[in-house]
Amino acid sequence: MAIDKRLTCIIIDDEPLAQELLEKYASRLPSLELLAIFDDAVEALNGVETLRPDVIFLDVNMPQMTGIEFLQTFAAYRPAVVLTTAYPEYALEGYEYNVTDFILKPITFERFAKALNKVRDQLLPPAPAPVQAADAPDGKRMLLIKENKRFVRVAVGDVLFVEGMKDYLKIHTTNKVIITHMTMTKMESMLDEASFLRVNRSYIVQKAAVRAINGNVIETINNVELPIGVNYREVIRKITEKGVL
């Protein structure tokens, strides 16, 4: 199941007002698609097999077949189930059938949304842990940088310099600038000190991107001047004396 998948649901409840409220809540969540509403659990049995929703919002107290009895009918196919009822004593019995959540009526939108989040946590696989650096197939060192809500691959060799802006960084590459929420300390730990040089509290530059060192200024190959901070001038002085960058 894709992480951005839109979840589908059905509502099984014999109370018109409860149906109307849950339908209203579902319509307020773009990530949730309501497939059908049933006021009879027996009728809903066929609907579940046909529609195969991701989640069922299931009332406990209903004529002909209760919500608990409905849960006992499931075989191979089993969607996530959120029980809805005005009777808290049914909670323990419901959890014996591995329901995802139990909501007491009257239901607020906040509680409805919280139940859906539990469903998502159950049905959708966790996002992979952010990998800060990895080896690309061609042997190039790669960074995985979060840009907005996605992770983009950036070849370390393409990074000219990094500019700090409070809680954000601008990563200046050979063809674009990437803005990411990260500290300079974190970025510095991801970069090889043999290839990159901290020249200021706000700048890290790739050594191969340095065109010239002019006094207390680093000139880069893309015609940007980076000031050398007071606390970093001794390091730069030793580099220039050694004659190797």
Image (cartoon, helix red, strand yellow):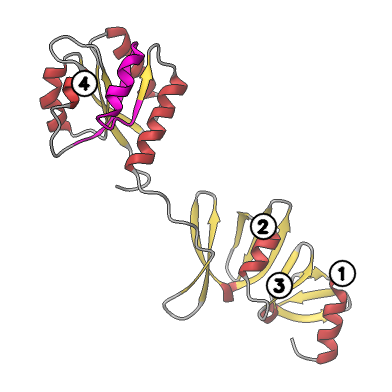
- Gap in Å between the C-alphas at discs 3 and 2? 13 Å
- Gap in Å between the C-alphas at discs 1 and 4? 69 Å
Q: Nearer the viewer, mark 2 or mark 4?
A: 4
Residue at image mark 2:
169
Residue at image mark 3:
205
Q: Nearer the viewer, mark 1 or mark 4?
A: 4
Residue type indicated by callout 1: Asn
- Residue for point 85% across, 89% down: 241
- Where is residue 123 drawn, in percent x and y? 32, 41
Q: Are marks 3 and 1 in contact (CB under 8 Å)?
A: no
The disc placed on residue 68 is 4
- Crowd around label 4: few <14 · some 14–19 · many ≥20 (10 Å): some
- Where is residue 21 drawn, in percent x and y? 36, 14
Residue type indicated by callout 2: Leu
Q: Secondary structure at mark 1?
A: helix
- Where is residue 107 drawn, in percent x and y? 40, 15
Is 97 within the magenta? yes
Residue type indicated by callout 3: Val
Q: Secondary structure at mark 4?
A: helix
- Gap in Å between the C-alphas at discs 1 and 2? 21 Å
Please provide the residue range marked out in magenta.
78-101
From this view, report whether residue 223 is shown above or below residue 3. below
- Crowd around label 1: few <14 · some 14–19 · many ≥20 (10 Å): few
Residue at image mark 1:
231
Residue type indicated by callout 4: Ile
Q: Sequence-wise, which precedes: disc 3 or disc 4?
A: 4
Image-based side of 135 in relation to 209, left or right: left
From this view, report whether residue 119 is shown above or below residue 71. below
- Gap in Å between the C-alphas at discs 2 and 4? 53 Å
